[in-house]
Image (cartoon, grey):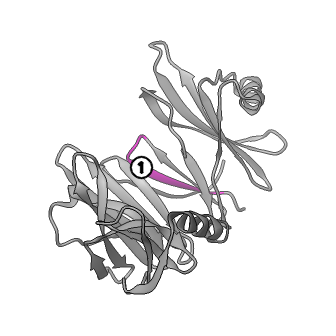
Amino acid sequence: MLPLLYRYDFGAPVWRICLDTVQSRLAIEVRDAEVLLAHFFSLDARIFNLLPIQLENTLTWWLGLEDAHDGLVFLHGYGDQQMGEHKGIRAFAVPANTMQWEQDTLRFYGVGEQGLLVQPADAATSFKVVNYRTGAETGEVISQQQVVDAIAGFHEERYKNCIFPMHYRQGEAYFTMVQEFLEAQLNIKATGAIEYAETEKFIISSYYEKDREDKLNNGLTVFDLRGNLYLHVTLGTRLKGIGTDTFFIFGKNLYFIQDRNSLVVHSLHF
């Protein structure tokens, strides 16, 4: 078995997770549709200390998690609530739990090496760079293609200590290869899609299998390279469709959401 490092039930569905790879933290968005409230948290991935982010605005349902970087968590509001259009940026410092800055007229686009890449809410094409710690504009105006290139160029450095799974649809050659392995090892009849990742020691797979009522159950397995089983868990049951990013590896630990509400972390380093 893989050592269990952390488990926490948020009591409502985990909607989004963003990785702060500089400070080794996770920003987490939890949305409770029954009471129309959103909650935001920062988890220190080194000691697994969970910090609720304190918001003065009680209408948190109309806020969302945008990203996290270097000790800051970035939230967005909504310009058009029906269309889900993002507008505005709020930057919260963690673990200090204070709002560093707020800009209501900007839309977040991404993080580049030079700062936050944003778009004025009243502009269709122009993009700007702002200092991510202060929200101050640097004066640099760039094109959309430059923004795309800047985000892509920074991505490899930013996530160099992370592994995200490859998503293989049924019919692809690699899907069939993993499907046959799971059936031979555990008599699992995977269908639809498989997510797959490898480390130096382990093979991790997330698969879907139909139940008697034709609903999908999502499971996760971890084998070592010799085919020994280290973990086999159910992530969700009676699902209507297939998801993506069902797990990730950060700092040599395996993270996944179980039963929509619970964050679970196992060590892959022992």
**In which quadrant of the rendered view does residue 213 lie?**
top left
Q: Secondary structure at mark 1?
A: strand
- Queried whether the magenta region covers residue 108, the answer comes back as no
Question: What residue span does the magenta drawing correspond to?
Answer: 259-267
Give the residue displayed 70% in from the left and 26% down from the top. Answer: 186
Above or below, comparing residue 116 to residue 168 in the picture: below
Residue at 41%, 70% (x, y): give it. 118
Residue 39, image x and y in percent? 28, 60
Image-quadrant location for residue 54 = bottom left
Please, which residue is most extreme toward the top here?
212
Question: Is 69 placed above or below 258 here?
Answer: below
Is 189 left, or right, of 146 in this rendering? right
In the image, residue 132 sits, relative to residue 19, either above or below, namely below
Quadrant of residue 41 in the image?
bottom left
Question: Where is residue 185 shown, x and y percent of the image?
Answer: 75, 28
Q: Which residue is mark 1?
A: 262
Q: Position of residue 142 (x, y in %)?
A: 50, 74
Q: Nearer the viewer, residue 113 or 179?
A: 113
Does residue 49 appear in this view?
no
x, y (%) of residue 110? 48, 67
Q: Answer above or below: position of 113 versus 199.
A: below
Task: Give whichever of 138, 22 is nearer the camera.
Answer: 138
Circle 1 residues within 10 Å: few <14, some 14–19, many ≥20? some
Please indicate whether residue 174 sits to the left or right of residue 105 in the image.
right
Query: Is residue 81 at least partly visible in the picture?
Result: yes
Q: Amino acid at mark 1?
A: Ser
